[in-house]
């Protein structure tokens, strides 16, 4: 997506009507070492309100859903996810952005039990929201 933006195939031009915070997925971040792709996309969206979570990049906290954790130990998986959701809530952002389907599912399910719904989007959805 960054390449498509760089080649003017995709042209993010609309400011987002919401603020975002990005959750670094374990596999993409710690395993593959990619902490820049999503942030690169966000940096090209005009007037974006992007708020980093306190624990981010290499120090990011797991969502609790990867590696089969949700299947093997539901209670522990939920506890880990709730801890990460607290990190998001501290940012005051409107939308939690995750680039992993397991993370997205985990946060959406946890949102059902939260006092305030957590709106979860993928980086691709955020980019789409910024296109004319």
Image (cartoon, grey):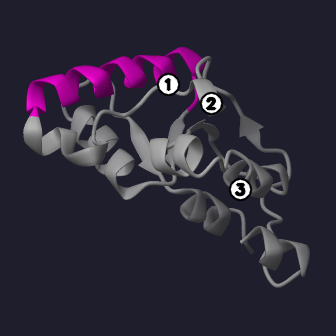
Judged from the image, the secondary structure of the residue bearing numbered disc 1 is: helix
In the picture of the structure, the residue carrying the numbered disc 2 is: 58
Q: CA distance from mark 3 to mark 2?
A: 14 Å
- Majority secondary structure of the magenta segment? helix
Residue at 53% in and 14% down: 90
In the picture of the structure, the residue carrying the numbered disc 3 is: 37
Q: Is residue 11 visible?
A: no
Residue at 43% in and 46% down: 120
Q: Position of residue 126 (x, y in %)?
A: 61, 58
Q: Position of residue 70 (x, y in %)?
A: 17, 41
Quadrant location of the N terminus? bottom right
**Do tag 3 and tag 2 residues touch (Cβ < 8 Å)?**
no
Mark 2 or mark 1, which is nearer to you?
A: 2
Q: Quadrant of residue 86?
A: top left
- Left or right, residue 47 beside residue 120: right
Residue 99 or 89: which is nearer the viewer? 99
Q: CA distance from mark 2 to mark 1?
A: 16 Å
Residue at 77% in and 44% down: 48
**Residue 84 lies in the magenta-colored region:** yes
Quadrant location of the C terminus? bottom right
Give the numbered dot on residue 88. Answer: 1
Q: Is residue 81 above or below residue 12?
A: above
Part of the protein shown in magenta: 73-93
Q: Quadrant of residue 20?
A: top right
Judged from the image, the secondary structure of the residue bearing numbered disc 2 is: helix
Q: Position of residue 95 (x, y in %)?
A: 52, 40
């Amino acid at each position: 997506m960054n390449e498509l933006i760089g080649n003017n195939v995709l042209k993010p031009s609309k400011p987002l009507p919401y603020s975002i915070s990005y959750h670094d997925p374990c596999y993409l971040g710690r395993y593959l070492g990619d902490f820049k792709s999503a942030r690169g996309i966000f940096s090209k969206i005009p007037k974006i309100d992007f708020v980093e979570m306190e624990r981010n990049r290499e120090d990011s906290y797991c969502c609790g859903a990867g590696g089969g954790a949700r299947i093997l130990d539901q209670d522990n998986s939920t506890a880990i996810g709730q801890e990460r959701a607290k990190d998001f809530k501290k940012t005051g952002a409107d939308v939690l952005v995750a680039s992993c389907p397991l993370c997205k599912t985990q946060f959406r399910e946890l949102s059902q039990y939260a006092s305030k719904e957590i709106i979860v989007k993928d980086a691709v959805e955020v980019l789409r929201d910024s296109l004319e």
